[in-house]
Amino acid sequence: MAQINENGVENTVTINDNVETIKSKKRKATFTWYIFLLPSFIGILLFMAYPIVESFRLSFFKSNGTIESFIGLRNFQLVLTSKTFWNTVWNTFFIGFFQIFITIPLGFIFASLINSVRRGQNFFKVVYFLPNVTSIVAAAMIFQFVLHPEMGVANYALNAIGLPTSTWFSDPSTAKWGVILLAVWHWIGFVIIICLANLQAISPEMYEAAKIDGASGLQQWLFITIPNMSGTFAFLLITGWIGSLQRFNEVYVLGGPNGSPARSIQTMGAFIYERGFTGFEFGIASAATYIMFVIILIFTFINLRVSRMQL
Amino acid sequence: MKQVKSVWLMLLFALVITVLTVGCSSDDTAGDDGSETNEDAVEGDWDGQTIKVQLIGDFDLEDSTDPITGETTQGLQVIKDEFESQHPGATVEFIIMPWEGYTEKTQAMITSGEADVYQMPGIADFAAQGVVEPLEPYIEEDPDFDLDRFIDNQVDGWKALGPDSDELGIYGLPFLGDARFIAYDKQLFDEWGVEYLSEYPTMDEVTEKAKQMTGENPVTGEKNYGIWFRGDWSSAFTLINLAEGQNGSWGSGFAWDEIEFNFDSPEMVSGLEWLLEMQEYAPDGLVSDQGSEKWLTPDNDIAIMLNQGPGDTIMSAYAQGLGDRIAIAQEFKNDEGVGGMFAGSPITMAKDSENKDLAWEWMKFATSETVQQYIFEEANGMPAIQAAETWDSYAKVENLMDPTMEAMSTPWTPRYPWASSQPRFILTSEVEAALTGERSAQEAVEKAQVESEEWLENRN
């Protein structure tokens, strides 16, 4: 680039080839980070994207893993007309509804109580959070003993206070409640911690102003705390439902792939496992997986609209 | 400065990739047992040949201590050393997998050609896929090999249909034996003053004795139960055996397009009604596999246990000091002396094995006395060969092993072809529905029949 100075002499500005421009430096830096991203990106492609596409392809085939034949939409038809599948949908929603309906309010109440005590908050946080740290598989095995018809702590306690006992996992009507109890016990620690985080973020000035206006503790809780928790409740609702609709581990431990007794605790995930991995019906399992995906998608969309949660 | 930082980042990245590459790459110089391939192997007929052998269950490569008996057991290394010394130049590598999810893991392995020899309980499904080698040509051409070495019915039990064949053929050799039988506690029988079960008990005999031993034990004062059976996972097989005991059957056929179910037969209905009656003499919880926690302990409170297996019974009984207290009777047999679920594991050769001759050598070796004795004495498994009856280790546990060998020679063969397919789960769920009062016995088996037939129709 040439410029004329005040003496009428032409100034020539040349760019040394060895000098890096800011633009090229930025390009290089970006390139470096792309290289860092590459291994995880390849992993995502291989272990997430490919299985999703392959599963979709399989859903149109009758396949036992090695021998395949194209059957179009027949797998979807079989699953959608299967009473067993709709029974698993019912079980999944039943267990999920009561888990969420019980855990979120109960967890919020516990969180409020913990938040209101002056000493020992950390102790209570740890104690209540411990179940959530425990593996759900291990917890399910322990709950088999807790809810044992003859030796279980639950029946012992019920008997001690004069209430009728149950055979729990040996009765289709109570087996679901056994799973709900386990799910509530396991999830409540998480709910408490999330609620506590929100509770501690509510401005103290609001409570001070309410006190000056003469609001009681209950009124403060009802009209300041709860409205300020709406975002947290929405988050717990959405994540809780997604987790509930994917439920598999604990029902597999408690009732096997066919959700004993009499398929009373078989969930959609267990149905997929039963047809795919015990019966070599990978096409049906894949079709059921996509139907489950659509159910979760629709239900989550409804939840988002109902809770007015911003993503 | 930034350029220097960038160079360091690149170096760090290169280091991470190198570590990952080295860590994740297969090591051709090491077996799956972690031991290095014997590069100094003696040159011989098998020079440079390697076979990979997949095994399922509680096998250990190294010596270990048994958690039940407390005794030190030898690892598979001794078997590997023995085979390699008999076949100079050959190398054996073991791939051990747990029982959990073995079917899908085997499917994945055989699809990707991971091993040459497989332990394969679900042989019928795999033979139909054409992924395992038919063994008749090897058996016929090998003068050193005789099928008479196996316990009666073991070879027939594992016969399967190939992808294009109409007749059952040999695709696997019996490797691990297994059986189902009725076990009982002689001490409880003595305390109640009840005569022991006969060698081949009938349903009426079991009913009568189970009734007599339910209630307060006249000697200990403890609550006793006359009978227990698992009401969930294996209940379909318990019911099928009851039908067999009445000269009924589960149905007929082996290929899917030939199968016919008899789930709603009169024998199945009366079998399920019998189970409902027996439930009254059992502890609560058998539908969820509960109530039998004291079995095989000195505090046992159950007299008769239906549908038991040797792996969970024999060595466990001896480990608890109950070897003489526990006894075994046969499952219900039909008028021809046949009945009970055929179980165990055969070994098979992968169709795409590159060292089939060596694989065959391994299969012969695995069914020889050397390996079968190792399985019995070191790996808590049941042998599949008749020679077991001559071993000293067998003599020590003879009172439980004799009836087990009898049970292994008289099951229903070939293995129920639907044993790991949807009809099994349909029937299991309906047995559970009956046991939990959801349906009557008649309604339950009729529903199982209809659903199984619908499934079969859609499958074919």
Image: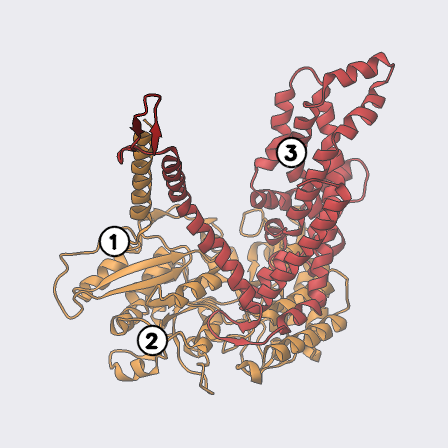
Chain colours: A red, B orange
User: In the image, which disc is placed on residue B30?
Assistant: 1
Q: Quadrant of residue B369?
A: bottom left
Query: Which is more toward the observer, B3 or B394?
Result: B3
Badge 1: chain ID: B
Q: Secondary structure at mark 3?
A: helix
Q: Amino acid at mark 2?
A: Arg
Q: Nearer the viewer, mark 3 or mark 2?
A: 3
**Residue at 31% from the left image edge and 83% from the top image edge:** B137
Q: Amino acid at mark 3?
A: Gly
**Residue at 66% from the left image edge and 78% from the top image edge:** B453
Q: Secondary structure at mark 1?
A: loop
Are callouts 2 and 1 both on one chain? yes
Q: Secondary structure at mark 2?
A: helix
Distance of label 2 from label 1 (alpha carbons): 34 Å
Query: Which is more toward the observer, A285 or B222?
Result: A285
Badge 3: chain ID: A
Query: Which is more toward the observer, A292 or A37?
Result: A37
Q: Amino acid at mark 1?
A: Ala
The x, y position of residue A201, in whole percent, is 68, 23
User: In the image, which disc is placed on residue A189?
Assistant: 3
The x, y position of residue B167, in whole percent, is 46, 87
Q: Is residue B365 above or below residue B244?
A: above
